[in-house]
Amino acid sequence: MAAASGTQIVGLLFGGRSGEHEVSIVSAAAIFAALQDDANRARYTVLPFYIRKDGIWMGGDTASAVLSSKKPLEAEEGSENRRDRWNFPAAAADVDVWFPILHGPNGEDGTIQGLLTLMQVPFVGSGVLGSSVGMDKIAMKAAFEKAELPQVPYATVDRAEIWSNPCVFPKLCDDIEAALGYPCFVKPANLGSSVGIAKVRTRAELEAALDSAASYDRRIVVEAGVTAREVECAILGNDVPKASVVGEITFESDFYDYETKYTDGLAQLVIPAELPEKVTAKIRELAIEAFRAVDASGLSRVDFFYVETTGELFLNEINTLPGFTALSMYPQLWANSDVPFPELVHRLIQLAIERAQPAR
């Protein structure tokens, strides 16, 4: 497909081989709509590329149909030939800048970023390092610790320690109880959208949660629980990143789990968050520091715990490729910072092109 005169071809890449496949499609549909804005239509021609759940790339009418329906395609019978995974649609060669909106493993963990880097075409978001460090909660926490950013107490665990002989596992649980107490949170290191996360209050729940987390990932992190408000800040930029207003997530469930995140009405976004001015300023400052600590670029959402009774702030995590529907926290934070959705998408594409320019 030829680009309209004077426009750049944007490859909108979505779907992917992760549990967040469906979320990716919804994010991509919102970005596609933003690129149909009058100003963006004069700047860009959009080519959608859909990665099926089995890893097969689809372009043209098939990718457009998935965007329109917002429903994934199932793998076709006989599609297990691994050669098919390297047969990219011919139009991929025409792309001037990629906009990958692939959430979770194989999408925001540095793998697709490595492929796009090898293609030598600019792409939106963090590079290999920022993506991989931001995705792995253990590596992320190590980077934050090196940067002396405040975090709740935590412990790291390997699957081999959990699925070990009967003498090792009880000692592991003893150590976690002594170091962190209850309640605490057990999290697979490399999954997004709260998949596999459990809040535990007893030894039996701890043992079950560790076993469950080990089925998702060989690296697990356990964090001390805190009674706190959950607040978030969005970052936009490369070498000179900017922070948005601060937002807050409120919910009635025990914690911000997968069901609460993706079920309408179970969570509410409060933007801007009702916080003391000095707390807001500190959150924005720490968010930029976290962005730099993992070498992120383009965009990120940085999540915090604010303990109102003590005034303490704890950095929870950074998400280098956050949900991007029109109602997601990241674009909402920028909309409330005077950057409307279509303009936000334009700025991200320009930041990708800027980052790809050779150093002067």
Image (spheres, rainbow, N blue to C red):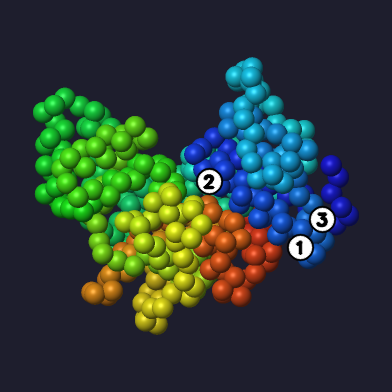
Asked which secondary structure carries label 1, the reply is loop
Q: Residue at x 69, y 27 (%)?
A: 87
Residue 103: percent from left, percent from top: 53, 46
In percent of the image, x 78 and y 65: which residue is there? 39
Callout 2 touching callout 3 (CB < 8 Å): no
Identify which residue, 254 or 356, lies in the foreground. Answer: 254
Looking at the rendering, which quadrant does residue 85 occupy? top right
Query: In the rendered view, does 251 fall on the left or right side of 74?
Result: left
Label 1: how many Cα within 10 Å (few below 14, some 14–19, many 20+): some
| Residue 139 - label | none
With respect to residue 336, does 40 lie above or below? above
Residue receiving disc 2: 103
What amino acid type is highlighted by mark number 2? Answer: His
Left/right placement of residue 356 relative to residue 90 reads left
How far apart, in angstroms, are the residues tagged by discs 2 and 3? Answer: 27 Å
What whole-number distance in Å separates the C-alpha atoms at marks 3 and 1?
Answer: 14 Å
Q: Position of residue 29 (x, y in %)?
A: 67, 51
**Percent coordinates x, y for residue 8 in the rendering:** 78, 53
| Residue 103 left/right relative to 281 | right
> Are circles 3 and 1 on residues that touch, CB within 8 Å?
no
Name the residue at the bottom extreme. 277
- State the residue position of label 1: 37
Q: Residues within 10 Å of mark 2 (few under 14, many from 20)?
A: many
Mark 3 = which residue? Answer: 7
The kind of residue tagged 1 is Asp
| Residue 248 in view (yes/no) | yes
Residue drawn at x 49%, y 39% is 19
Amino acid of disc 3: Thr
